[in-house]
Amino acid sequence: MIIKDKLLLKPEDFKPSFIDWEIKGVLNPAAVRLPDKRILLYARIAESAVQKEGTMLTCPIMSSEKEYSFAYQHIHKKDIVRMGRWGEMYLKDGSCRLPTISHFKKVILSKDGFNVESVDEKPVFSGMPGDGDYGVEDPRIVKIGNNYLMTYVSISTNEGVSTSLAISRDLKNWERKGIIFREQNKDALIFPERIKGKYVALHRPEGFFAFSKPSIWISYSPDSIYWGRERSIMQPRRAAWDHDRIGAGAPPIKTRKGWLGIYHGVRREEGVTIYCAGAFLLDLKNPEKVLARSYTKKPLIEPKKNYERSGYMNNVIFPTGAVLDVNGKDLLIYAGGADSVISIKKISINDILKSMEYY
Ligand code: MAN
């Protein structure tokens, strides 16, 4: 199988939000084709203060403008350094829960998906108190009718690691709809069209690990806000590259053979955790029915490149975006590498369909 790949974005391509901050990773982007045929990415920027004595925001958390202004006026000077302003967003020092805080930046790619045309300086989407106090991560965007729907991981003090939904018509102004899949549920994405009148999503509740391993679930909704009729449709497999946990990656692409999805699977081998990417095919009319899946011994993509083997988290390929090439025959997969960089992989859809085991 021929995979054409390219390292697209790395931390040095972006400016940290504050002096004395550093970008630890540029990863796990949403990808969607724009009406002018170029491709838009929402890149996740994970950053933190450089850890040295007296620097600000060692454990950043989103705060409200009111809280920020109060502190600015009333708190002793030395404490002010523990707060910061980030465009329209306000941060303060929080309890140490996450080593980095993430927001999204907009990147425009050429029509072929391989060249970066522009990178926005300001965040296009960040967490806020009550919806990602500890940041937002791993977005997925689909267009349904005139609306763009974005699912993203929101990490909040009271709601933990959940999945939220936001809707936009212009990819700039987002209406936040709140949490759709509650605590310890991520890797959620919505299908690009309704099936039998219902919105369809894949998601990944963590479950009780000793009983069932984290697997891919399906869920339906009449309005994209309230979800139900859930069940697990794909599970980790014994002695496979996806032995320990799996999660849906990019929103599925409609092909004549079925819904083609790209997912990640994790295994631990001799103390090393490895994230690979695989493919699956779901029935067009009944997406609960898994028609095919990458063989247990052969993932679609293994973390083989240097930028996937070493970085913030070694041995990680984490696909979150997939767009059909302008030729209609190839798939452009956008993925995080080692939780540090973003790459593109171009693979022919026929090759992907041939690489799977059919049930
Ligand atoms: C989890 C999440 C992702 C991350 C992977 C690999 O699934 O934290 O954001 O990319 O792990 O570390």
Image: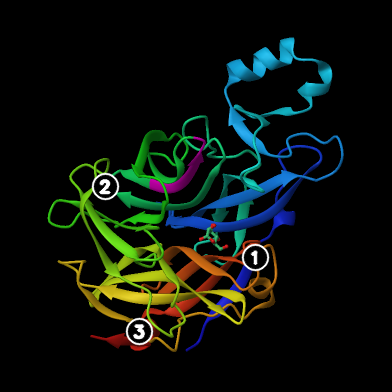
Ligand 1 within 8 A of label 1's CB?
Answer: yes
Q: Please tell me whether residue 155 belongs to the stretch shown in magenta.
A: yes
Q: Which mark is residue 313?
A: 1
Q: In the image, residue 234 lies at what x, y percent?
A: 30, 71
Picture disc at residue 188: none
Residue located at (71% from left, 39% from top) = 17
The span picked out in magenta is 150-157
Q: Nearer the viewer, residue 29 or 348?
A: 29
Q: CA distance from mark 3 to mark 1?
A: 32 Å
Left or right side of 171 for 16:
right
Label 3 secondary element:
helix
Callout 3 amino acid? Asn
Question: Where on the picture, by quarter, is residue 298?
Answer: bottom left
- Label 2 CB sits under 8 Å from any ligand 1 atom: no
Which mark lies nearer to you, 1 or 2? 1
> Which residue corresponds to the image point at 46% horizontal and 57% vertical from the top-left?
31
Q: What colouring method underlies this structural image?
A: rainbow
Residue 145, disc: 2
Q: Residue at x 24, y 46 (%)?
A: 227
The one of 8 and 251 positioned closer to us in this rendering: 251
Q: What amino acid type is highlighted by mark number 1?
A: Met
Sequence-wise, the earlier of marks 1 and 2 is 2
**Quadrant of the image containing the C terminus:** bottom left
N-terminal-most mark, 3 or 1: 1
Local crowd at mark 1 within 10 Å, few (<14), some, or many (≥20)?
some
* Tags 1 and 2 touching, CB below 8 Å: no
Per the model, the C-alpha gap separating discs 3 and 2 is: 28 Å
Residue 350's label in the rendered image is: 3
**Viewer-proximal residue, 28 or 98?**
98
Residue 329 visible in this rendered orientation of the protein = no
